[in-house]
């Protein structure tokens, strides 16, 4: 693994004024003057001699076989060795082993032609055992190198600090990108490929929160060391920050070889780490991007690996994903969505459809959920088609657009509720509230104003909040919802059971309703364990006097089981598909099911229960 080399391709900053090898004649370095040239010649030689003796720059004459043949006294001050000691051995004896080969190759080039070096750096050992960085300017006449060097150790140390992560000592993003640029450039003369592996530790936040930041830091160092052990010396391992690492691998032969490296990373991190008296296994999501193109942009390659990593993470973690053409098309689509979303409201491209919430025992709708759809005006040109909320609301959530969309939905729903009230249909309409809206201080006031504008009471609305929104800031969310609740508005917890939701979370909020996640309903007709969990959840929700809604009912079997588990109301395509407000049937009963009795499987407080 490469960690010491500093970026190339960037010129060194200008050095302070000092001795330039071109200012000293080769003969002048080897003589102190004299001869029959008269007083002027004596004065010139004496000046050169004094300059040679007194300058702080390191002056040297070096033979082509790598021996110092002349040194000025400044060498003793910089390296601690006497001039005699330095000249007694080949210069490579005092040179850092990693720098010997390149230095010798450059010196030998002087035997074939007149050669010159500028700002070439290598390292020499000080008498105390430390390493000093020297920056050289030199010229060769075909037999001898005449050189001037200066100590740039302090500058190199500062540059290294700026290019390495202080905790793990790995290269940081800046150095990684320079290395990636060099590796991609080398594709001009090779037939391999370059790969970037973007690694995210799946469980690190929980470990950090539960065991403390000191343990977390120790674990990050251990992860960096294990990655270094398994990678080749030519690979670069960098820390991007937090629990994210990137591996740069070059000279690979195929995509499958890059994926094999990523697979080894996933398995290597699963081996337990010893953290004090605790053993911790790390799960990792890895995104892989590869390039054969010597003109590729390293920033694009990193972004692609990042996108692939998030795909792996969303798929459950502990896996790897390759950024391929399919994923590239998805990214391009998301970029188009993000760009066009800013114009969706002004162009009136957003619309609302409504899906009734119906009693499973039969009867009219007891509620209705408003769902956002997006129809771009030029569907044929954009190739997007009608978009569901899952395709664009997350991007809106990450920007200020979600507040504008949420405000539009609130006022549009209130206007529709007023129309239905005039037609004699008085039911609450549910709207989904974003995380960002729940953090706004004036949210309850905006709800009150929207209701007042349409002359509605709070009972006309039901606000649905997600588990994610609640867990982001439970105290603040509870306070905001309590303010809304005082207006008479009902509150529902959406997607219950999809994540870490529990009834203790539900009890901490001013709720009226639990909406079971559609994955529960979709699976409980095939999974007896899931069915028992759903039954217990429904029974406990009844005890807490919460209305339970079975969401995602799509088959008669699911409907029958939901009724059997004592779920009073439901929502799904089988009962009624989302539709325009003028076509929604709110006065009609749900699908009639007679193949299963409508009685609960689970009851509390010692009642007889059938299993």
Image: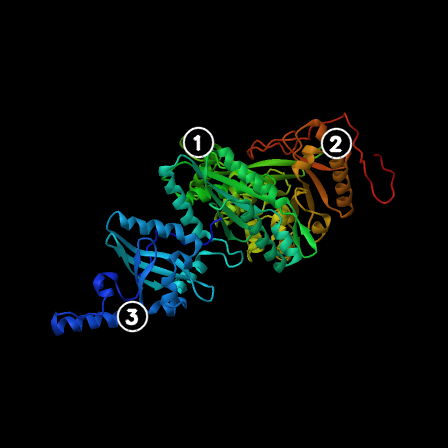
User: Disc 2 versus disc 3: distance between alpha carbons?
Assistant: 93 Å
Q: Is residue 174 visible?
A: no
Determine crowd level at label 2: few under 14, some 14-19, many 20+ residues with C-alpha closer than 10 A: many
Q: Is residue 36 visible?
A: yes
Q: Residue 144: where, in percent of width, then height?
A: 27, 56
Q: Residue 504: where, in percent of width, then height?
A: 72, 51
Which residue bears the numbered disc 1?
383
Residue 421 vs 22, above or below: the answer is: above
Residue 270 vs 73, above or below: the answer is: above
For the residue pair 223 and 24, the one nearer the viewer reads as: 24
For the point 33% across and 69% down, the residue is 73
Which of the 4 image quarters holds residue 332?
A: top left
Determine crowd level at label 1: few under 14, some 14-19, many 20+ residues with C-alpha closer than 10 A: few
Residue 74 vs 226, above or below: the answer is: below
Which residue bears the numbered disc 2?
561
- How many numbered circles are shown? 3
Q: Nearer the viewer, mark 2 or mark 3?
A: 3
Ranked by sequence position, the earlier of labels 3 and 1 is 3
């Amino acid at each position: 693994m490469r960690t010491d080399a500093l970026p190339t391709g960037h010129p060194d900053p200008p050095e302070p004024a000092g001795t330039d090898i071109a200012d000293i004649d080769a003969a002048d370095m080897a003589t102190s003057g004299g001869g029959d040239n008269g007083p002027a010649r004596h004065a010139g030689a004496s000046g050169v001699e004094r300059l040679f003796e007194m300058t702080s720059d390191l002056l040297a004459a070096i033979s082509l076989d790598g021996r110092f043949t002349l040194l000025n006294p400044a060498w003793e001050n910089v390296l601690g060795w006497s001039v005699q000691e330095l000249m007694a051995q080949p210069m490579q004896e005092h040179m850092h082993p990693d720098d010997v080969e390149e230095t010798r190759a450059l010196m030998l080039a002087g035997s074939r032609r007149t050669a010159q070096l500028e700002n070439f750096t290598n390292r020499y050992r000080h008498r105390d055992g430390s390493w000093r960085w020297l920056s050289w300017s030199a010229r060769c006449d075909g037999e001898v190198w005449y050189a001037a060097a200066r100590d740039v150790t302090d500058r190199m140390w500062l540059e290294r600090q700026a290019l390495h992560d202080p905790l793990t000592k790995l290269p940081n993003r800046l150095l990684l990108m320079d290395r990636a640029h060099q590796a991609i450039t080398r594709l001009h003369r090779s037939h391999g490929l370059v790969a970037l592996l973007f690694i995210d530790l799946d469980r690190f936040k929980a470990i950090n929160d539960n065991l403390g930041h000191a343990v977390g830091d120790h674990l990050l160092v251990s992860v960096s060391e294990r990655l270094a052990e398994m990678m080749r010396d030519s690979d670069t391992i960098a820390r991007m920050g937090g629990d994210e690492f990137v591996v740069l691998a070059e000279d690979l032969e195929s995509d499958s070889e890059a994926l094999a490296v990523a697979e080894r990373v996933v398995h290597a991190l699963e081996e337990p780490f010893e953290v004090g008296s605790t053993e911790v296994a790390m799960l990792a999501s890895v995104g892989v991007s590869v390039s054969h193109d010597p003109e590729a942009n390293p920033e694009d390659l990193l972004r692609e690996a990042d996108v692939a990593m998030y795909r792996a993470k969303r798929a459950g973690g502990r896996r790897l994903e390759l950024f391929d053409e399919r994923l590239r098309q998805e990214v391009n689509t998301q970029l188009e969505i993000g760009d066009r979303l800013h114009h969706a409201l002004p162009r009136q491209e957003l619309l609302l459809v409504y899906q009734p919430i119906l009693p499973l025992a039969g009867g009219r709708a007891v509620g209705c959920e408003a769902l956002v759809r997006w129809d771009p005006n030029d569907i044929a040109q954009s190739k997007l088609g009608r978009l569901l909320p899952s395709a664009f609301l997350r991007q809106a959530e990450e920007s200020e657009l979600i507040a504008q969309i949420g405000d539009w939905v609130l006022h549009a729903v209130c206007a529709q509720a007023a129309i239905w009230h005039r037609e004699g249909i008085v039911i609450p309409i549910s709207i989904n509230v974003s995380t960002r809206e729940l953090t706004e201080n004036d949210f309850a006031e905006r709800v009150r104003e929207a209701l007042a504008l349409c002359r509605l009471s709070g009972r006309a609305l039901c606000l649905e909040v997600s588990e994610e929104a609640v867990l982001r800031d439970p105290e603040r969310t509870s306070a905001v919802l309590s303010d809304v609740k005082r207006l008479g508005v009902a509150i529902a917890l959406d997607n219950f059971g999809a994540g870490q939701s529990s009834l203790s979370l539900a009890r901490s909020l001013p709720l009226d309703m639990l909406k079971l996640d559609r994955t529960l309903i979709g699976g409980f007709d095939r999974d007896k364990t899931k069915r028992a969990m759903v039954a217990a959840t429904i029974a406990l929700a009844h005890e807490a006097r919460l209305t339970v809604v079975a969401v995602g009912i799509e088959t008669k079997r699911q409907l029958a089981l939901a009724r059997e588990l004592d779920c009073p109301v439901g929502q799904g395509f089988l009962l009624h598909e989302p539709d325009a407000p003028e076509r929604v049937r709110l006065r009609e009963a749900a699908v009639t099911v007679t193949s299963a009795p409508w009685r609960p499987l689970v009851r509390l407080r010692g009642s007889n229960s059938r299993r």
